[in-house]
Amino acid sequence: MTLTAQRRTVTATYPSAAAAASAAVDVIDELLRAGALRNLGVATGSSPSPVYREMARRRIDLSAVTLFALDEYIGLPAGHPETYRAVVEREIAEPLAVPRARVHLPDGDDPEAYDDLIAARGGIDLQILGIGRNGHIGFNEPGSSFDSRTRVVDLDASTRAANARFFDDPDDVPRRSVTQGIGTILEARRLIVVVSGAEKAAAVAAAIDGPRTEAMPASVLREHPDVTWLLDEAAASHLSSRSLRDRVGA
Ligand code: GLP
């Protein structure tokens, strides 16, 4: 069997972001019941957020699971409510009863240690991803090497502008972050990409139907052996009809 034949990409479109999130929780629940989810990779952002709310609603038990965040800002004061540590604790760890000692984020002072930690813990079983309007995954901005490892990066002006909504002043948005590399993300055993909203439609279509190029970081995801795109109607609205064949529940 060729490597290509072993790849599995599912693109599913749902009538709402809540329905897409619920489908993600079905996968998480199934893996937990099978004893196949020890290390869960979590993304922050408005697209994945409903997944965590749905997990809390369904009382999914993550008490034995270790969380690995995708990325973290550099330069915010410790404890700032928009640090991804604060977001992961507030939106995921606290509602889902994950002990603090089992919540890991990359550290800009020692990025490589994060890849080592993930490997030492046996790798990420399931990575939840969102994508940026420019196709970034984590904070791997366009131009990031597909081989990249966890490292410190500069944020694109467009990313800083998109994330300004979380800050009092656009100037407060950090200029740098530390992110899992694209190579790191691809090592997760399974990927779920949750995307909602019309402002992501062009990036989703480029990632799924467009050329594989480092200018569109999410286009690398098709190389992963097990990736599931869970989209709402708006995010899926620019996809080719071929890619839309897996429409669910619409
Ligand atoms: C953020 C995060 C990404 C996230 C993306 C989209 O800046 N670093 O991990 O996937 O941008 O976020 P949102 O879903 O809020 O648009």
Image (cartoon, rainbow, N blue to C red):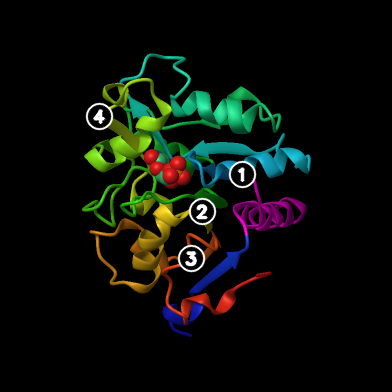
From the image, tell me which residue sits under label 1: 50
Label located before the other in sequence (4 or 1): 1
Most common SS among magenta residues: helix
Label 2 with label 4: CB-CB less than 8 Å: no
From the image, tell me which residue sits under label 4: 175
Q: Separation of disc 3 and disc 1 at Cα? A: 17 Å
Q: Quadrant holding ligand 1?
A: top left
Q: Separation of disc 4 and disc 3 at Cα? A: 30 Å
Name the kind of residue labelled 4 in the image. Answer: Arg
Q: How many residues crowd around disc 3 within 10 Å: few (fewer than 14), some, or many (20 or more)?
A: many
User: Relative to residue 187, is residue 39 depicted above or below?
Assistant: above
| Residue 53 found in image quarter | top right
Label 4 with label 1: CB-CB less than 8 Å: no
Name the kind of residue labelled 3 in the image. Answer: Ala
- Position of 97 compared to 42: left or right? right
- Position of 37 compared to 218: left or right? right
From the image, tell me which residue sits under label 3: 236
Label located before the other in sequence (2 or 1): 1
Q: Nearer the viewer, mark 2 or mark 4?
A: 2
Q: Nearer the viewer, mark 4 or mark 1?
A: 1
From the image, tell me which residue sits under label 2: 196
**Over which residues does the magenta segment extend?**
16-39
Q: Separation of disc 2 and disc 1 at Cα? A: 10 Å
Label 4 beta carbon less than 8 Å to ligand 1? no
Q: Nearer the viewer, mark 4 or mark 3?
A: 3
**Is residue 178 one of those drawn in magenta?**
no
Label 2 with label 3: CB-CB less than 8 Å: no
